[in-house]
Amino acid sequence: MNLKGSSILSINQFERGDIENLFRIADQMEPFAQRKKITRVLEGAIMGSMFFEPSTRTRISFGSAFNLLGGDVRETTGLENSSLVKGESLPDTARVLSGFSDIICMRHPEAGSVAEFAAASRVPVVNGGDGNNEHPSQALLDLYTIEKELQGRGRGVDGLRIAMIGDLKYGRTVHSLCKLLRLFNEVSVHLVSPKELAMPDELVEEMRESGIQVVVTDILEESIAHVDIVYSTRIQEERFPSKQEADLYRGRFRLNKAVYTQFCEPNTVIMHPLPRDSRGDAKELDSDLDDNPNLAIFRQTDNGVLVRMALFAAILDVVHLVDKYVEQVPWHNPRLSG
Amino acid sequence: MNLKGSSILSINQFERGDIENLFRIADQMEPFAQRKKITRVLEGAIMGSMFFEPSTRTRISFGSAFNLLGGDVRETTGLENSSLVKGESLPDTARVLSGFSDIICMRHPEAGSVAEFAAASRVPVVNGGDGNNEHPSQALLDLYTIEKELQGRGRGVDGLRIAMIGDLKYGRTVHSLCKLLRLFNEVSVHLVSPKELAMPDELVEEMRESGIQVVVTDILEESIAHVDIVYSTRIQEERFPSKQEADLYRGRFRLNKAVYTQFCEPNTVIMHPLPRDSRGDAKELDSDLDDNPNLAIFRQTDNGVLVRMALFAAILDVVHLVDKYVEQVPWHNPRLSG
Amino acid sequence: MNLKGSSILSINQFERGDIENLFRIADQMEPFAQRKKITRVLEGAIMGSMFFEPSTRTRISFGSAFNLLGGDVRETTGLENSSLVKGESLPDTARVLSGFSDIICMRHPEAGSVAEFAAASRVPVVNGGDGNNEHPSQALLDLYTIEKELQGRGRGVDGLRIAMIGDLKYGRTVHSLCKLLRLFNEVSVHLVSPKELAMPDELVEEMRESGIQVVVTDILEESIAHVDIVYSTRIQEERFPSKQEADLYRGRFRLNKAVYTQFCEPNTVIMHPLPRDSRGDAKELDSDLDDNPNLAIFRQTDNGVLVRMALFAAILDVVHLVDKYVEQVPWHNPRLSG
């Protein structure tokens, strides 16, 4: 699939070759994300950032990625500031807003809403998360991170052994990641959650049909013993019928230094889609692991900028032009120089 | 009137010649809005976008128009995020904020507030809607749309027959449009609303004094029978004393395929300032008309970008320079190429 | 201290020589702030604007200053739109967000929070106000204004006589300004407040230890009689345990035309960090002084842009490059040309 002009709604759109292409574009973006050089290839282009649900990380990541390619961002945050509260249909909103920009990134609390919006939009739409449904750019950055982490060990994604832990029912990032893993060979997945928060059956079915070896369990210790990656997730409180119900599960599976040391293989990579819940009753991923070099959670978010830049460059068809619009960096960014 | 350095507060500022000049500038903006070329004439200029009331469409339209000319946008949305809640007077806010930008676009819930702000501002202020008072850029884009739609039929705005339908009491867009129509000859207007939501008397008086033939009525069918344009509006719930009172009127006048087919002349243009209320009890403009080529509502919002670019270019006095700062468009915008 | 790569957390970081260097850089920024020329030295750089507490003025001032140097701004406003509500720790937020930008400006309701954030950030952080603790850029712009106002009279900051009036307990701007004044010689300060809202003891101690002559009082008239500057402040209602308690103090010390004329020396400069509270029961600085040429309050906010540009230029180490990236201003800004 050529991404030129495409909306990115679901991870199902991608073939393995698409992923590989995209990741090589992401690699190409690294010097720009690290401020070794600047490109202005998207100067004059406008991205509409429509986050109809609270978000800092994903919203800023998309926006910064677009800025790093030289484009401008026009933003909307929160449903209450929108014409949707005046009874406007999503297709109307889409038709209007798509007249103002070249591409739209959107998050919305309802599953399927982004696809409905995209169907009426006149420009490509990138799904930044629709309810408990999908969050494809997160899955892509997760997989990109897995690839890069394993690369250092001379390994690829084929043969991956991964444990996913926590709220597998409402966590859209793990849903999208599981779909993505179906494109690879000899993958084994341990799904660790309270029974009530298990991965939806049809997703488990799909994985098994595609050849993934799936273990569904509620026992943490044995599940993390022989894997390359432990992928921890937060209890998605905001998707639960009530806070009380979420409270039942918070803190049920905790990965911390003691657990890691006792049960994991020495170089097991630790991932989390973030934000992790660091309140006392949660701590699904303890900060006592913060100095463990295998903790990849901040490399994940950094990689997110690369993957989103790659998506923009591919959709707007400027991959081959990025280097033509290069400029030098006159300022000092201490993050990168030391 | 030369718009250089002027605030745009009310449609009353405009003479017929001003409008015509402005619309020719808007025509000039079309290749930029369609991404056939880029201009960076306002590079380094800052627009202050001060929306002290919810808005997506107008806010993003202004912002994108400024970006398309190369400028930056600094934004404030909602009263609660502002120093006004700390007891600051509007003139103080104006004096401060006008030190940060080259032009300010502002929406505010109170009628007259934008003019009060502009009086203290050191840079031009464009009224993006002040309570139920005025919304001049909307009236301008409406008139620009009327002109363009009738142009295809070899007609101009003189001789226009238009029906305005719905909440004519609180709908500031129709107020501003009515004022604007006084500049043209042989115009006839049907004002269709529940008696309680009628166009304010003084506006009707002004129209009649300027020679417009006005019919005030609460019967939809005969009012839309012999007009060029039907202009439908939403019940402005947020301006009513209570939601209950707004509920009395919602859905009272509905334009849909059946009504249009039975009562309108074949090529009657359908307009609406948007958002339209598509909830079941409202539907003042039904989506079953969406495939009617005379439905101009999305052409209206697209035209809004052109008209706002024209206002910025005229106020900041760069009309003659827009083409001097032209660059090529390296990226692909699928909206425009098909 | 070389500011290159530094976070700006507290006014305590600055030596007198640093201040003087910074102010000379601010002077250099004036033609850009006045749109006599444009610089694009920070083109491609991204500032993360993280205002976890309502702010218009400071937020827009920082953003505009960054835009005036050619950079882009990615913004977050309000705690409710952030991942902090999902239980993320401040260090996690810092590590993530600092991967998206080159510098971060941050406001937060809790004292000390910005320093905690900065400790985990990978890019420099500028404190835009942390609870009732500090607001260093405000103190710097205040001092810069004092210097410029007195300059016209052939005076410097040494020997300054200043009266600070109002809420000296919760007003972080006066806290930061007092700390800054310790760097100068022969300064005398009158601290005028209700006893319950007095300047914290340790701050008074620190001032005295550094040689400042401090008078703590609750009598307005005699305190403003022999000073160069009267610095009025608002009752910081939002920091009080309850609105009722704030109401006790609002309007207690009022500076107006009558008081000024009767008690102040003729050229006494009037300052206020803004917003001033212009509601009837407050009016700590009456608008009947608005035509007094010694009212420096709007020169203060204008100076804020210069000082913030200077901070950015120094931190990102582009002071020597600002002029290399100069362009002409094609548009008309009426604020400046008349």
Image: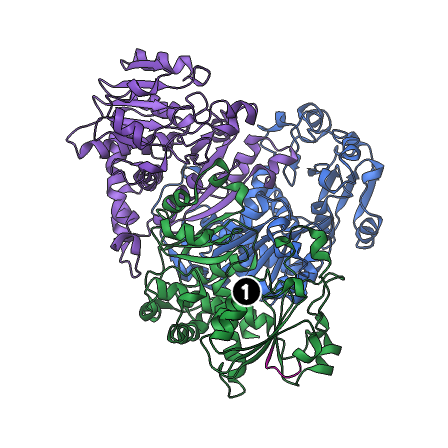
Chain colours: A blue, B green, C purple
Total marks shown come to: 1
**Side of C286 relative to A310 (left or right):** left
Q: In this view, does B143 lie above or below B196?
A: below
Give the residue furthest to the bottom.
B154
Q: Is residue A137 above or below residue C247?
A: below
Secondary element under disc 1, as helix, strand or loop, is: helix
- Magenta highlight: main SS: loop
* Mark 1 neighbour class, 10 Å CA radius: few under 14, some 14 to 19, many 20 or more: many
Q: Residue at (49%, 81%) from the top-left corner?
A: B157
Identify which amino acid the numbered label 1 is placed on: Thr
Q: Is residue B328 above or below residue B213?
A: above
Find disc 1 in the rendering and name its residue.
B173
* The N terminus of chain C lies in quadrant: top left
Query: Viewer-proximal residue, B150 or C90?
Result: B150
The span picked out in magenta is B225-229
Q: Residue at (34%, 71%) from the top-left corner?
A: B323
Query: Viewer-proximal residue, A41 or B41?
Result: B41
Would residue B141 be visible to someone looking at this image?
no
> Is residue C193 magenta-colored?
no
* The C terminus of chain C lies in quadrant: bottom left
**Side of B130 relative to A93 (left or right):** left
Q: Percent x, y for residue A230?
A: 70, 37
Q: Percent x, y for residue A136?
A: 66, 53
Q: Percent x, y for residue C334?
A: 30, 56
